[in-house]
Amino acid sequence: MSVAEVPVARAVVRGASRGARVREIIFPASLMLCIAFAMLTLVVLLLDVAVDGLPVLSWNFLTSFPSQVFPERSGIQSALVGTLLLMVVCAVFIVPVGTASAIYLEEYADGNRWWNRLIEVNIQNLAAVPSIVYGILGLAFLVRGPLELGRVVLAGALTLGLLVLPVVIIVGREAIRAVPNSIREGSMALGATLWQTIWKQILPGALPGIATGIILALSRAIGETAPLIVVGAAAFARFNPNDLTSDPFSALPIQILAWIQDPQEEFRTLAAGAILVLLILLLFMNAGAIYLRNRYEQKW
Amino acid sequence: MRQVTERPESSSEPRAAESAAGAQKPPAAEPADGRVMGPGTAPAVEGVKAPAAAPDSKPVFAVERLTVSYAGRPAVREVSFGIEERRITALIGASGCGKSTFIRTLNRMNDLIPSASVEGSVRYHGQDLYAPDVDPVQVRKRIGMVFQKPNPFPKSIYDNVAFGPRVLGMKGEMDEMVERALRRGALWDEVKDRLKQNAFGMSGGQQQRLCIARALATDPDVILMDEPASALDPISTGRIEDLMFELKDRVSIVIVTHNMQQAARVSDMTAFFTVVVDDTGHRHGEVVEYDETEKVFTNPADERTEAYVTGRVG
Amino acid sequence: MEAASIAAAGGPRPNLTRGRTPRSVGENIIKALLFLAALISIATTIGIVVSLLAETVEFFSQVGIFEYLLGTKWSPLAGGDQKSFGVLPLISGTLYLTALGLVVAVPLGLGSAIYLAEYASPRARRIIKPVLELLAGIPTIVLGYFALTFITPVLLQGIFGIEVKIFNALSAGLALGVLILPVVATLADDSLRAVPSSLREGAFGLGASKPQVVLRVVFPAALSGIVAGLVLAASRAIGETVVVLVAGGANANLGIDPRESFQNMAAFIAQTARGDIAAQSVEFLTIFAVGTTLFVMTLILNAISIRFVRRFQQVYE
């Protein structure tokens, strides 16, 4: 925005009318109010959760299994373990598949071919499909149907993985696109094959961006409730899943939902405690993403 | 032999750009944008006179009726000439006349642009580079390239040079190969104590010499240079030119340059490209004249070449 | 120069042919693997469509399509004669809750975006942008908790003294507004910043005041991008599950009283899936019928949004 023009415009306005001058103050002030409201909401929300939840937090809360009878002896061990397992399996799925898709679309796909355009539009569309619909997909194809995995960690993690895959692909593509073409050409001109160029030059350059996308995707997955409801995560799991393919599992959002909907006030405060744990996990993930971005991002 | 003070550096560039429209015009009055050129005024480009090959030199490239198109529209048309071994061949001409497009066909870098297509033939030591069974990777292994903007990899100086030998699986002691390449690139003394440092920390001129050394590490037969000094200051430019002279006895060099003085100083042979506007108003490049550099600059056969090299265009 | 003489004069012929080296085979295998990975997204879409349609067809073999689309009473889980499969109350509830969310998010989001793009100093941007990102990253279950434990009892019943039920549309709508506010703000900010500054300078040069420039020049120029963002935000609100499940209640409501309990399609699906119902029963099949309805609605909205984005890109690229 040109600074020089503003005083000129102001002078004109001053000559023009009083009302216009008032508008020049009121307008930005009301815009600031909008921002202030958004920030205030965040503050109030965090305070609301913290006031209810902080007293609940304790080592026992983290390590106990949930109880439907005694709120004071109830904890989130199975939910926390379930969430961590979901995240690990989800990452194992989305890291290779998302990165490979991004590489294919950026480096190999000829945009004039209809199937490549279809893949692209399709990913855009998938990003906007409601998460509950992914739950239905998981229920029909993974839990029941062709794969018949049952209500297990693997089914939940794959459902979440499919849900956040578009995020990984979209962010990954941006990171790959940010590697300048001159690097590609320099490498190819030395006789490197396309894959050597991708593996040794482009991926190292795009890695911080790709990693940021993966963390972003995982932090979306970790807070998702709806698909896990449909896939059938258990609300009050009295034990941790022993493996990924046979035991029922719980997850933090599912546990939180169960406590929120409990008519007893004491259980509702437990929800706040579990929310705090969830938010702290998210905070660590986001801090990790920011650190990666600042520490390793390649300046071209 | 070449003093820095003589160097006109980039002052000729804007003029070259301005003359883009004018270079191909006959004296007849033309609209300023140069888009209209009736069939009657089309210049005779067909019979480009190939010079008699110097008796002691062998051809590296024989280019025959080469036309390169992007998305079906020709960027250079009907280019035919031979490039000789162990000599420096300069490609000169105004912006947009297809010099860069042309040089990229010599090591199949144009393959990287999906819409590019090539007609005619480019023979490298007699072998058609565009034959269906030719592997572009094998081509680029032998024909190195240096680009307009220095493009070191964001790695150490050592790794930059070692990259080519590594991906090609070359046998031998890597440290020795790196040192040899850096010595040939006239960079060894400057960087031998900081081989592990990131190449991005070097000056622009050093980066470009690193890129040349990197290309030399795979022991190529030809090095293509696409305006290698256009982003550099006169001193760095001088170093690159000195380097070209030193390399000449081992490799053939093809250089695209906007800087006519540079072409006159360094090259043995010069090809002059110009922009031609066809009947449909589409612009493409053609070769007007190809000859010994001295002849092109002192006694050009074509009046458009003369106008360009003497700066009398526009 | 004769081609023949070149061939004769050339030295030993370099071998440039590709051959069936392990390397070139490997390159093709890698390309195929990458392509397969990219196909997973297509498989996902096919999977969604197949899983929805198969059971939806089954559903319509038991419930008339007009009864479903035009009926005004939704109580598929009720017993005996009380069962009714008119989806209109669910659709209207979904749209009503979305509208409430938009009423909150559109003015606040656009106001925030205009401030960010046109007024905020770079330093203020560096603070505000992460706050918006943080707000966007809050899991929706947390917003549901916020609606149930703060918006309803403290804000609505306490501060404003509105007689709302424990589960009510107003609270859920406000929470939806908070949910999509960052979406609106971020996308509108992007579109406003994409407007070339020459346009602003031109208007200032004519003596326009800053509010005039912003509202009459910059805002209209960014409109298609902003609309695309709004449509996307609406689609987020339409598909949201947990906020409505927690704060909106379980009442498929055809009315418009915001103090009452309202349910949307996604919350119905979640509630039904959680319940103890027999697979392949008609209750179970409603999950898929409602899922199809929701999927089609968001698909249409997304197509509209993509169209607007395309138009926006054409203008400035």
Image: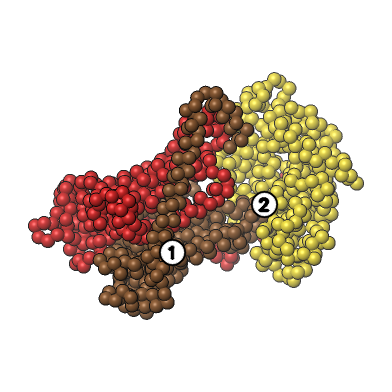
Residue of label 1 = A279
- Judge by depth and name the residue closer to the eye, B129 or C250: C250
Residue for point 82% across, 53% down: B243
Question: What colour is chain C?
Answer: red
- The numbered disc on residue C176 is none
Crowding near the residue tagged with mark 1, few <14, some 14–19, many ≥20 C-alpha atoms within 10 Å:
many
Q: Which chain corresponds to the colour yellow? A: B
Q: Residue furthest left?
A: C81
Q: Is residue C277 visible?
A: yes
Which element is circle 2 on?
Answer: loop
**Quadrant assignment for the C terminus of chain B:** top right
- Chain of the residue on which disc 1 is drawn: A
> Which residue type does callout 1 highlight?
Leu
Q: Are marks 2 and 1 on the same chain?
A: no
Q: Position of residue B154 (x, y in %)?
A: 66, 59
Which element is circle 1 on?
Answer: helix
Residue for point 59% across, 50% down: B112
Question: What colour is chain A?
Answer: brown
Q: Is residue B89 visible?
A: no
Residue of label 2 = B107
Q: Position of residue B254 (x, y in %)?
A: 75, 48
* In the image, residue C117 above or below residue A260: above
- Judge by depth and name the residue closer to the eye, A213 or C184: C184
Q: Position of residue B253 (x, y in %)?
A: 77, 50
